[in-house]
Amino acid sequence: MRFEVLLRDVKFPNPVLAASGTFGFGWEFLRVANRLGGVVTKGLTIAPRAGNSPPRIVETASGVVNSVGLENPGVEVFKREILPRLQRVKCPIIVNLAAQSEEEFCELTETLEPTPVAGLELNLSCPNVKEGGVAFGQDARQVEKITRAVRKRTRKLLIVKLTANFVDPKETAKAAAAAGADAVSLINTLFALVLDQDGKPLLGGRTGGLSGPAIKPFALFCVARVARAVKIPVIGMGGIKTGQDAFEFISAGAHLVQVGTANLVRPDGALEVVKGLRRMVRIRGWQGWDDIRGKAGEGCFS
Amino acid sequence: MGQVVAIGRVGAEVYSVWISERKISKKVKPGQFIGVKVPEREDLLLRRPFSVADVKGDKIQIVFRVVGAGTAKLAHSKRGDKWDIIGPLGKPAPLVRNKSVVVCGGGVGAAPLFYLTRVLQEKNRVVVLLGARCAAELVMVSAFRQLGVKVYLTTEDGSKGIKGLVTEALEPVVKVMESPVVYACGPEGMLKALCPLSERVKVWAFFEERMGCGTGVCYGCAVPKKDGGYLRLCQEGPVVSLDEVVL
């Protein structure tokens, strides 16, 4: 069967992408990147960001809580030093954008429009920054406003990354779709608090975002719910580490999936998912992704 | 995949494991580390980072203290067990030549310094200082002695060697040396105590820290730099010039 997935005019060789913040910018593990469906870069801001004070990452039961705080070198260094290295990456590169205002999102978009990256993922869902981030993603009107403003400035594939923290992602996904987004991706990490033995916040940023297998059932629920509510493609993520996991998200209605935390366990974590999916395709004899996509959602949400 | 070829308790809650892993043993340099997945515990997601204590042929040694569920599980491994490991990770420690070198280890922090000492003593004059809270917490003392280097011991309770902190014993040793180079590994408090010294003397600090990926992509193992921003221990370290960071 044809393994690739077409989102508008961007051809992903397979449905498995590396998620933002878990795979660097894409050139670090070139041999892995070149066999993935795509790579979403680490979140990029206009100015360089130092990130939050340590500790920044802690393991919890079947999960990881992080509070990195969008450490990145800024868009100018990205264009000058990182982008040339990305020419060696064969799969589509999606740049994850983070900003504190609509104006900043627009500026980032305009800066990246002439570059050869395949698409943009608007991070309206980072739980680890004081301004912007998740606050945008919790407000459907903000999602619509920012998406619309960015849409006007780019012809690239536009993905809006949504949160499920204290907001119904069905509503924000509808807002993104109405404003012209080509796809939505979800879920970003869940709000999390980890305390130390003295009952004090363990992370330097105090609160963080939970990811990994611990959030998979909730992520699947969200993806199934959103996929039934919008016509644009959904990119599913949350605790995926095997081919079976990816299959489940596609069954819930996802066109593509992203693998995040599993990349921290092994640099080829996302590749393991690709291999697992290939094995399943061979054994189950699917003719196309349409054979399975969304089949789980039927009857789930009436 | 590595295979456990020997495992034993070498101190209070401290274990030594020899793992057969050809690719890593061929490449690993002093200061580098490996990432070990805790077997049979899918709920413990992340790899545990361990500095390599020594290398012999196809085998690498790690020495670690049990601090949680992951290290407890690893300590219960048996000969022949398979471990999912990646490495070598991190940058090798910078090696000097024809220098007076002081190796300073606190507790289980002695372990990562052993491989280094074995390599350094071929081309330098090396003195080793190992400290711990008590005699039972000193590790790898006889191994260091077998290298033929001078080994001084300190314990906080005076149960072995000089009574006091290893960092206190370090000062007079360094003072009588001409442009010495210090390699230190131990708990954060110990490295912190060495910061004033690092302004006069080159101190290479081996950090043993919580990590996410160990491969540079998660930005989890950040340590603040003196000139602003952070460095990633797994990429720019884990051996760092102590005068470059803020503790």
Image (cartoon, rainbow, N blue to C red):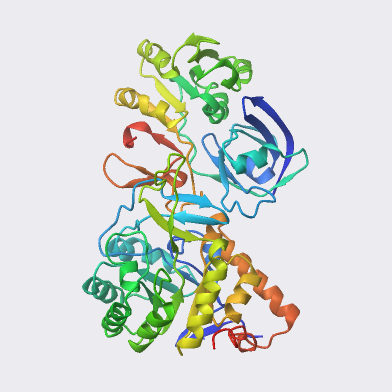
Most foreground residue, A120 or A149: A149
Looking at the picture, does residue B177 appear above or below residue A194? above
Looking at the picture, does residue A262 appear above or below residue A203? below
State the image coordinates of residue A158 (x, y, percent, origin top left).
38, 80
Q: Quadrant of the C terminus of chain B?
A: top left
Relative horizontal placement of residue A132, taking residue B95 as reference (left or right): left
Relative horizontal placement of residue B64, taking residue A76 as reference (left or right): right
State the image coordinates of residue B35 (x, y, percent, origin top left).
58, 46
Point 45% across, 87% down: residue: A232
Residue B56 in view: no
State the image coordinates of residue A27 (x, y, percent, origin top left).
46, 62
Point 44% across, 65% down: residue: A20
Looking at the picture, does residue B35 appear above or below residue A271? above
Picture quarter containing residue A21? bottom left
Relative horizontal placement of residue A175, taking residue B120 as reference (left or right): left
Point 51% across, 10% down: residue: B158
State the image coordinates of residue A207 (x, y, percent, origin top left).
38, 54
Relative horizontal placement of residue B239, taking residue A279 as reference (left or right): left
Residue A236 in view: yes
Picture quarter containing residue B61? top right
Looking at the picture, does residue B102 appear above or below residue A116? above
